[in-house]
Amino acid sequence: AFLEREEHGSTQSSHRLLAYSDALISIIATVMILPVAHTKIQDNEELKESLQQHLTAKIAVYLMTFLIVTVAWAAHIRLFQVFERIDDCLALLNLACMMLITFLPYTFSLMAAFPDNILGILLFCSCVIVIGLIQAVIVLYGFGRPHLLNDQIQGSQNQGFYKRHILKVILRVPAFCFFAGIFSFVYPLLSYVLLAVVIFFPYISQSLRWCYSKAVGKDEGEISDPMLFYSYHPNEPLSKERVEAFSDGVYAIVATLLILDICEDNVPDPLEVQQRFNGSLVDALQEFGPEYLAYFGSFATVGLLWFVHHSLFLHVTKSTRLMGLLNTFSLAFVGGLPLAYQLTHEFPHNSHNELEAIQISCVIIFFAGLFQLAIWVAALFNQRETLHPFVHYNGQDHAFMLAKLAVYPCMALGTFFVTCVLSRFSAPVFHLAQIGVPFAFLLLRLLVRAALSVLRWLSRPSHPAAPFSDVLT
Amino acid sequence: AFLEREEHGSTQSSHRLLAYSDALISIIATVMILPVAHTKIQDNEELKESLQQHLTAKIAVYLMTFLIVTVAWAAHIRLFQVFERIDDCLALLNLACMMLITFLPYTFSLMAAFPDNILGILLFCSCVIVIGLIQAVIVLYGFGRPHLLNDQIQGSQNQGFYKRHILKVILRVPAFCFFAGIFSFVYPLLSYVLLAVVIFFPYISQSLRWCYSKAVGKDEGEISDPMLFYSYHPNEPLSKERVEAFSDGVYAIVATLLILDICEDNVPDPLEVQQRFNGSLVDALQEFGPEYLAYFGSFATVGLLWFVHHSLFLHVTKSTRLMGLLNTFSLAFVGGLPLAYQLTHEFPHNSHNELEAIQISCVIIFFAGLFQLAIWVAALFNQRETLHPFVHYNGQDHAFMLAKLAVYPCMALGTFFVTCVLSRFSAPVFHLAQIGVPFAFLLLRLLVRAALSVLRWLSRPSHPAAPFSDVLT
């Protein structure tokens, strides 16, 4: 590596640039939950109505931002899989790209506030066009300095082919956005549909083609193309390090947003303490008791969902696009947890709203956990390439991994049904479940071992027959 | 590595656990600037007065949080330098530790709101005590499973000595906090001083001892102790990867907080657009023009300060505690940038407050850049161990690195003095400077080369004399 550096004075490993980009993108994707969580809900309204009235637009902004930013992130991964090394100029171009990506949520806020005005969509289209042009410049710059490219392309005879293919894929989205922008002058609302199609079409079409080939059982030969760059194929590799870094960022920001709310809202006013509580701070803080409980419970939930994700990716050897997509869905629900936290302590105790808030929290946790399980199931379909042998169908840690991944979906489902029956005790049940789960994880290895030996013991009755039949024959 | 895994089924590399902890700690350290930046400042007050009245307490909370959280982070680095591998149990204990660290800012908020009440300080002390106890449990657990320890300790004859030394250092702070907590019942205000001394004393005393030994020129032999764990010595190594990860987190969250403010505050109200601007969204958005400029300028500043940091740490081969400390100071100022952003667009154009806000921004940027330069200077004192030869005193990139590190301090200083003279044009000058700097970085290599050749040309007059004297003799 040092020899390399002395040849081309200013080149450098791209590792840290990518880590920084991952951190930026994960934070920007998640932080848009704050305007949702900060929406004030009136106590006297029904939660369902107020949800529909106030929150739908903001939740839509959050989900759209999360999806689009994740698509931009996937494009960023693809782009930087082309490069092995970077130099100062590429680093600066990448920062310009990041600046525009962090601006995208604002265009969504405008779209949500003024759905009939085309300004939001025009701003969005121009951002995407500029991002695409910067990425094209990055590709051209990189192919002009072949020592920056990855070994596969650097060693290839036909660099021009790679360059044209990559440029074609990168410039397709800006070109469509350009037309969508012009189209928006004619039919403003239809251009939203057009944009959604433009952005998700390659993923959808390739996935359908892949499913079709799986269903028909066509020869896999044509799929094992040596160049899996820029193919939108569900099996296209996605850098495992970057999926981990992005997920870490989301889990970390979600855990931190919780304490930020505590620090901003739950410090009592000195004057109020003097007047209402005769200067007794302890009494004043006791009012916030449920908030602290909700905080510790939510932090434990986020931390343990991270822990499950960490355990899963320890055994993942290669991450594919499909696994990345399922991971994105899981993270989008994790990002909703600050909303769940806000909801579970906003309502008076034992109200109907409180019950609904707790059930919404259960649903969010259930789906966050379920999509984590789905990542593993998707990986198992291709287990030789994507998983460590320990967690294969017959691996020694298969049952343990299944148990780990199943804890949160089961806990959420269980809590949901218990709160339906014991609706008066919904809050204590929910908090008890949240705080009890860490101990479940500590005991999980023991529990799995016990369960397995019980299973073995149950299936044993056939064994004593064997020696007996041995004796008979 | 895989062999190792099969021996001890459940052990794993600690890399991702540390990355996640770094992300959490960096976000929690920085996010406390939000309550400061969200403080509403009345237009008719003088900025200086309102700063003193409203902001002092919140800025103190921010700085205290940043310092204490960084101390906790340094303790976390030291703790996990002991371990090479982790298992599920250690990961869960670490998450419990993180939960308590993220709770520390709340205790500071309480202290700032109720300085005369001992509840805040008691809560803080109990958090620190519990964190210390969890860390002690982690150490005891790790020494009970020696395959988790790092190679140096694992190969050592005297593991018991290491264990006792580490436990002694870890439990010192909780013990002092216990006494500070009891002491707070007697003299509430003095116990703040006691706590500050407890937390910073080991750093200060070791640094003074180190400076003394440098000044007297004592033999360095006794310092090159093979065990530089837990010594508080300024030359004690600090994992370079973790310093980078922590800095990335701070830069990323600062860049993202800016757009969050834009999305929450600068989406106009549909009703207002209808009434004041006759439904013209473009007119309504033009009101926010300065905000967008401030956003792009601030994002460019944060991004480029990250870029300078990245360039510097590319050439750092080993990070020491002193460099870590200077990095912390630099990051504390970077964390202040959202405040600077908020200030530069809050005031009416050409007001006296605007000028002061811009000068405060310059001061923040100046110190952020200056401490980055200080990291390099500190590294140069020990350049053989800490720096790549390229940036040594006579290295080929020495001048280039100096120029990169000097850009921001020079730009901030220059803008400060220009705004003193041309106070009417302070905002345009400031924004021009912020937006012009990226181009300075693009041209920097050319500029440095030009400057060096000019310097060489200026010192050349002695050279023509040489052939001439050759001819003479």
Image: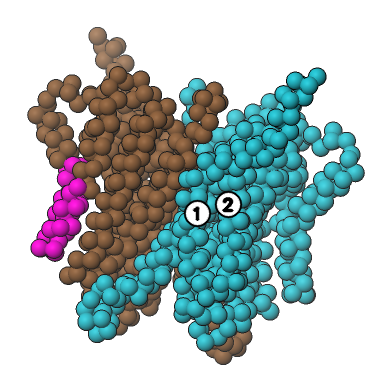
Chain colours: A brown, B cyan
Residue at screen point 74% across, 57% down: B200
The quadrant the C terminus of chain A occupies is: top left
Magenta stretch? Answer: A175-204
Q: Dots 2 and 1: beta carbons under 8 Å?
A: yes
Describe the element under mark 1 as helix, strand or loop: helix
Instruction: Identify the residue position indicated by label 2 in the image.
Output: B407
- At label 2, the amino acid type is Val
Residue at screen point 83% across, 47% down: B211
Quarter of the figure with residue B358: bottom right
In this view of the protein, can residue B87 be seen by the observer? no
Within 10 angstroms of label 2, few (less than 14), some, or many (20 or more) residues?
some
Residue at screen point 72% across, 55% down: B173
Quarter of the figure with residue B61: bottom right
A131 is higher (above) or lower (below) than A117: above
B272 is higher (above) or lower (below) than B142: below
Q: Earlier in the sequence, mark 2 or mark 1?
A: 2
Q: Across the whole image, how many numbered discs are drawn on residues?
A: 2
Name the spot of residue A466 as percent of width and height, x first: 29, 18
Name the spot of residue B263 as percent of width and height, x first: 36, 67
Instruction: Identify the residue position indicated by label 1 in the image.
Output: B437
- At label 1, the amino acid type is Val
Return the mark for residue A103: none
Rounded to the nearest whole Å, what is the CA distance between mark 2 and mark 1?
8 Å
